[in-house]
Amino acid sequence: MAPLVPVFSADTLPDHVNTVRRNFQDKKRKGTQVDLKECPLLEMMQYSCNPPQEAIPQPGVVVCKPVVRLFRRCAGGLTVETTSWEPIRQAEENRTHMAETKA
C-alpha cells in the first residue's frame, strides 16, 4: 500500500517545500531554506484524452485537450510542481506592485 500523502492548500506550498516527513513527523529540510520564487520556472505540456463532456465524437475520433503544468527546479535537484501556486504568487506580486505605485 502506498504511504499516506498529506493534503494542503497551494498557498502553503513554500512552507511544505522546506519540510520533510519521516515516520509521520514533519522535520525541517537540511541545508538552506528553499525560496520557490528564486527557482527557475519550467513548463510541461500534457494532453488529457478523457471521454468528452460535450458530445459523443464520431467513431475513431479521439479528442485531446492540452494541460499546462508548471514546475520550479531548485538547487540540489529539488523539483516542485507549482501549477496551482503560480496564480497565487502572481496575485500577491500584483498586490505588492499596486501598493508600491500608490505610495
Image (cartoon, grey):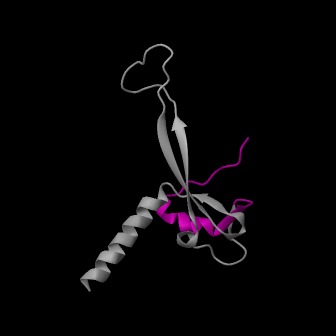
75 in relation to 101, above or below: above
The residue positioned 48% from the left and 19% from the top of the image is 61
Q: Describe residue 86's horizontal placement relative to residue 2 as left or right.
A: left
The residue positioned 64% from the left and 67% from the top of the image is 74
Verify whether residue 7 appears in magenta: yes
Q: Describe residue 78's horizontal placement relative to residue 65 as left or right.
A: right
Q: Which part of the image, by quadrant, shows the N terminus?
A: top right
Quarter of image, res 29: bottom right
* Residue lying farthest to the bottom in this orientation: 103
* Residue lying farthest to the top in this orientation: 59
User: Nearest the camera: 32 or 65?
Assistant: 65
Q: Describe residue 4's horizontal placement relative to residue 94 as left or right.
A: right
Task: Return the x and y of residue 8 as percentages of the image width and height.
Answer: 53, 57
Magenta span:
1-24
User: Nearest the camera: 35 or 5?
Assistant: 35
Verify whether residue 18 appears in magenta: yes
Quarter of image, res 21: bottom right
Q: Which part of the image, by quadrant, shows the C terminus?
A: bottom left
Task: Return the x and y of residue 85 as percentages of the image width and height.
Answer: 48, 60
Q: Describe residue 99's horizontal placement relative to residue 93 as left or right.
A: left
